[in-house]
């Protein structure tokens, strides 16, 4: 699950404590009607987590990826790669991957919510962008300007605030 957790910007924070499950098989048993088995729903929506059994020493862990749409998924098998869910170029052709089990939506807790109202005036606007710009390239001397909390104010922070311009906070 390391690759998937990093794709969601959670670093190493996707684990049994944050998901409630330790492997695809554990997920299936705990998700109930929030899990869509392969035999009933083979074509997952874009962004869904796709779950696979694994073979050999990886059998206890299984395998997980993110569905990209059109039958393709991204996952890490030694390095990040894109594979088809099925067929000749499918993931099941890889030596330690078993069979496609099904899919689920990512847990709501995985979605990062940024506080882009840097000056706390209730709206994300040019003033917030200016504060971030003034702190650009600096270590966290203005913790609020480090919107993504990665320890430095950089282009990512400007981009995040820019994407949220016009949002009103209550």
Image: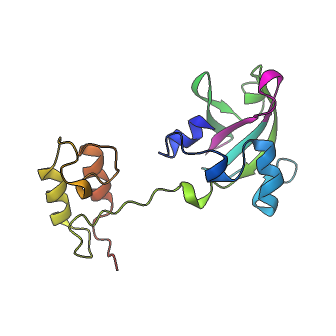
Q: Is residue 43 something that shows in the picture?
A: no
Q: Residue 119, how many percent across, how many down?
A: 20, 67
For image coordinates 25% across by 44% down, the residue present is: 155
Q: Is residue 118 visible?
A: yes
Q: Position of residue 151 (x, y in %)?
A: 29, 43
Q: Is residue 26 magenta?
A: no
Question: From which residue to which does the magenta span run?
Answer: 53-70
The number of numbered discs placed on residues in the rendered structure image is 0
Relative to 59, is 138 above or below? Answer: below
Residue that sits furthest to the right in the current view: 39
Residue 165 in the image, given as x and y percentages of width and height: 28, 65
Q: Quadrant of residue 3?
A: top right
| Residue occupying the far left of the picture | 134
Q: Is residue 62 left or right of residue 158?
A: right
Residue drawn at the location 56% of the way across and 59% of the way down: 109
Question: Looking at the image, is 83 positioned above or below residue 101?
Answer: above
Q: Could you tell me which quadrant the C terminus lies in?
A: bottom left
Does the magenta segment cover residue 60?
yes
Percent of width and height locating residue 53: 81, 35
Quarter of the rendering containing residue 110: bottom right
Q: Quadrant of the N terminus?
A: top right
Q: Is residue 70 above or below residue 33?
A: above
């Amino acid at each position: 699950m390391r690759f998937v957790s990093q794709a969601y910007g959670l670093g190493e924070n996707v684990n049994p404590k944050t998901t409630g499950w330790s492997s695809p098989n554990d997920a299936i048993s705990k998700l109930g009607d929030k899990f869509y088995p392969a035999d009933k729903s083979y074509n997952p929506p874009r962004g869904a987590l796709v779950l696979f059994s694994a073979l050999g020493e990886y059998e206890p862990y299984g395998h997980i990826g993110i569905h990209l749409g059109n039958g393709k998924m991204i996952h890490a098998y030694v390095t990040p790669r894109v594979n088809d869910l099925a067929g000749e170029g499918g993931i099941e052709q890889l030596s330690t991957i078993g069979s496609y089990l099904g899919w689920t939506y990512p847990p709501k807790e995985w979605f990062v919510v940024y506080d882009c109202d840097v000056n706390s005036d209730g709206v994300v606007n040019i003033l917030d962008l200016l504060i971030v710009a003034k702190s650009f390239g600096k270590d966290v001397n203005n913790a609020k300007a480090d919107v993504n909390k990665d320890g430095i104010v950089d282009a990512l922070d400007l981009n995040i605030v820019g994407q949220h311009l016009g949002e009103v906070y209550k």
